[in-house]
Amino acid sequence: MKKVIGYTLLLCSTHVYAQKHINIRVEEVSKTISVLASDSLQGRKVFTPEIDKAAQYIAEAFQQAGLKPLKGNSFLQSFSMVSATQESLTAKSNGTEVDPQKIVLITSKPQITLSSHNLSIEKITATDNFFSKAIQFAASDKDLLVVVDPAFADRFPRLSMLKRSFFQSAASVAFVLGDVDTQNLTITASHNIKEHQLANVVGILPGKKKADEYVIFSAHYDHLGIGKPVNGDSIYNGANDNASGTTAVIELAKYFKAKGDNERTLIFAAFTAEESGGFGSQYFSKQLPPEKVVAMLNIEMIGTDSKWGKNSAYITGFEKTDLGTILQKNLKGTDFNFYPDPYPDQQLFYRSDNATLARLGVAAHTISTSKMDNEPNYHKPSDEVSTLDLENMTAIIKAIALSAKSIIAGTDTPSRVDTSDLR
């Protein structure tokens, strides 16, 4: 019995020692997040010069860390988006005019006529996650007519936000409020289409014995930019959302490069356009064979204490795979705890940048401390570095590094998401 107790104490002390001696320092965390959330970057809004500056800063950080570009010779993973300004839309069902306010059309075509006879029909039911399902359908590669349950009548007009930016596509998607007769529906519309350039920032740390198996650390780096002034401040700095997660990715890249013992290949990704619909992560996820991605640890808003206080965070979709259990196992003997997502009604698992790969079966989860029922600075100009607990944030980044060690080493492989479970 004494030997067992002694071994247990030794194991615990070893884990505590390992956590304390992970070389991720609060001074570096503070330096990085202070740049990303500075007024000079004006909230990192998509399609602005400031988000381009943020991307360049992250790319330089990856280069200085010693990463390699995922492809080619640039850390910038560039892609095109389009936006559509509707100039006209008319619709008829069985020869009767339909209120155009009950139709939202997503298309890359300046002029288009659609008939329900030539469209695949899908539905958003009253029990679905409205925006998650809508985003999924909007990315379709075939023409769709999506019938939206009248229960979402109050939210339906917000689907027009999807027209602000989306991927160039030969397919068109018409969302129709459910009280419209879709039997013989014809929609004719014209749009002004503009093309825009965006870029993720992606670096890679090649693995050794399992180089063709990928572990991803990710976060989105965009935010809201300049908005409605509050107490004289109009810059929505996005320190917690999500300069905190981007800082974590940069610091983890530096740490694992210096450590130099990863058997699996590590990919570090900073996504753009999360606030606009998760387009950066959607594009990124399509560049990788999902069967080669072992795990994705997406990091979102870790600058404030969780509902359990310090030294804690939660994992979205905890029950979907055993990744969370593996992370917990690797943290035994430390002061840190990972918990299942305490906000299941928010359906966060499919609302962040992990969603695309999760839908493809990857053990892709988001780590966060955000109190979804009480984050006073969320999407406000007051989301500044001064409101964050950088000591605790550093502890979270260290915990992520330590908890992922067996996955990076190739000794643990998380189970896959059951894609038949998708709604």
Image (cartoon, helix red, strand yellow):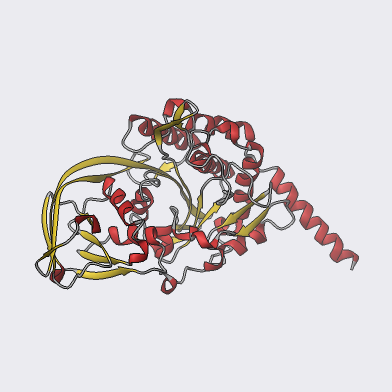
User: Where on the picture, by quarter, is residue 112?
Assistant: bottom left
Q: Residue at x 62, y 39 (%)?
A: 24
Give left or right: position of 41 versus 253: left
Query: Residue 345 at what x, y percent from top left?
Result: 52, 62
The reply to whether residue 295 is visible in this rendering is no
304 up-or-down from 152: above or below: above
The reply to whether residue 230 is visible in this rendering is yes
412 up-or-down from 65: above or below: below
Q: How many marks?
A: 0
Quadrant into which the C terminus falls: bottom left
Query: Residue 29 at what x, y percent from top left?
Result: 58, 35
**Near-viewer residue (91 or 45):** 91
331 up-or-down from 394: above or below: below
**Near-viewer residue (402 or 205):** 402
Query: Residue 377 at what x, y percent from top left?
Result: 54, 39
Query: Residue 237 at what x, y percent from top left?
Result: 47, 33
Give left or right: position of 208 versus 150: right
Residue furthest right in the image? 2
Quadrant into which the N terminus falls: bottom right
Q: Residue at x 41, y 60 (%)?
A: 357
**Near-viewer residue (64 or 381):** 381
